[in-house]
Image (cartoon, rainbow, N blue to C red):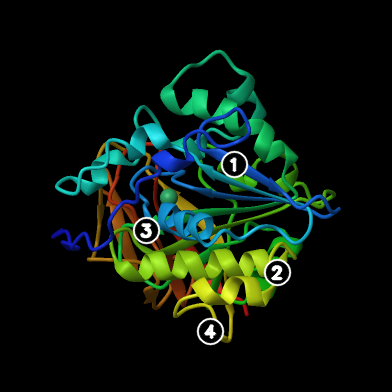
């Protein structure tokens, strides 16, 4: 399958000014309003090559915005991978040893295994534990519509609706290869109140991803009461005032690769709606993988088609 060649439009920002921070942990800064209110955490560079989130945080820092209530913590996650970013090989810096966003279960975090990403995850864990609300900013391989990943809990979907952008909200349980930060601990506990969202802001290198990341971040900070509209509007950008009719895609299953060789049956980019039930999606060591129902939506087909990893997720529009 031919790979689309996306121009690297975005310029990775210099995050060295944020290295020292004020928390004792590099690249983590907390602003305390001195008033009661939620502790809100916004994270970027969970994947080192997804630079739109670093641009959004850089804009927030430069604007000098401070929380109206509670605390606001801003963190650059996988800085070790980001430092390796090279615009000639932009996909190479997703991580150093392993995916930072597949480590977020107690057994792995408390366990004996070591890696660059586990060390960083363990260092950041107290901030994730302390947060009432989390927004984790990502981008995608293919240039498809932005997606808000809300997990499976009603309160997360409700928060995604209060944020109001982007148009598409996706409800899913994550990946067989390991837990995401947004699904860690109480964020995924139906009985808890902590709420996490993950934004896939668009294609990794396109200018629009930075605009979506910035707009969603600001709308998120409005929704949780950290910023006022007047605070946020000056850096809001073209996405900030959008008011789309939001739609919800429920993910029913992930196609996890079982064999040594997986190939897609078409040049899928994501958000294709396949009809009818039984349409061929791909072959896993020759075994046919077909759609389980009509109007099946393909979500974020992967380029990293390795055994045990997610090839694509399948879902349907529910609202
Ligand atoms: Zn990502």
SS for callout 3: strand
2 or 1: mark nearer the eye: 1
Dot 4 beta carbon under 8 Å from ligand 1: no
The Cα atoms of the two marked residues, 4 and 1, are separated by: 29 Å
Quadrant assignment, res 150: bottom right
Residue 222 percent coordinates (x, y): 68, 69
The Cα atoms of the two marked residues, 3 and 4, are separated by: 21 Å
80 w.r.t. 224: above or below: above
Sequence order check, earlier mark of 3 and 4: 3
Sequence order check, earlier mark of 2 and 1: 1
User: According to the image, label 2 marks what residue?
Assistant: 223
User: According to the image, label 3 marks what residue?
Assistant: 140
SS for callout 2: helix
Residue 128 percent coordinates (x, y): 66, 39
34 relative to 214 in the view: left or right:
right
133 w.r.t. 290: above or below: above
């Amino acid at each position: 399958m031919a790979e689309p060649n996306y121009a690297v439009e975005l310029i990775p920002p210099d995050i060295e000014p944020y290295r020292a921070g004020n928390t004792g942990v590099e690249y983590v800064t907390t602003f305390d309003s001195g008033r009661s209110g939620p502790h809100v955490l916004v994270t970027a560079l969970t994947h080192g090559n997804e630079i739109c989130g670093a641009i959004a945080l850089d804009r927030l820092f430069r604007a000098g915005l401070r929380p109206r209530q509670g605390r606001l913590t801003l963190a650059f996650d996988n800085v070790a991978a980001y430092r390796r970013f090279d615009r000639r090989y932009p996909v190479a810096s997703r991580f150093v040893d392993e995916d930072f966003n597949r480590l977020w279960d107690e057994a792995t975090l408390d366990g004996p295994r070591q890696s660059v990403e586990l060390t960083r995850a363990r260092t950041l864990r107290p901030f994730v534990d302390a947060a009432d609300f989390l927004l984790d900013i990502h981008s995608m391989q293919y240039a498809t519509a932005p997606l808000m990943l809300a997990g499976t809990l009603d309160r997360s979907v409700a928060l995604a609706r209060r944020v109001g952008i982007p148009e598409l909200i996706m409800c899913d349980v994550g990946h067989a290869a390991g837990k995401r930060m947004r699904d860690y601990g109480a964020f995924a506990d139906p009985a808890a109140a902590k709420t996490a969202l993950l934004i896939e802001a668009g294609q990794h290198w396109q200018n629009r991803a930075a605009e979506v990341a910035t707009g969603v971040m600001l709308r998120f900070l409005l929704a949780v009461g950290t910023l006022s509209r007047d605070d946020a509007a000056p850096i809001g950008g073209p996405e900030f005032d959008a008011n789309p009719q939001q739609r919800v895609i429920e993910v029913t299953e992930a196609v996890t690769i079982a064999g040594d060789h997986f190939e897609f049956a078409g040049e899928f980019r994501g958000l294709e709606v396949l009809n009818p039930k039984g349409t061929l999606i791909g072959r896993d060591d020759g075994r046919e993988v077909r759609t389980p129902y009509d109007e099946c939506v393909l979500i974020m087909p992967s380029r990293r088609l390795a055994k045990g990893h997610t090839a694509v997720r399948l879902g349907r529009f529910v609202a």
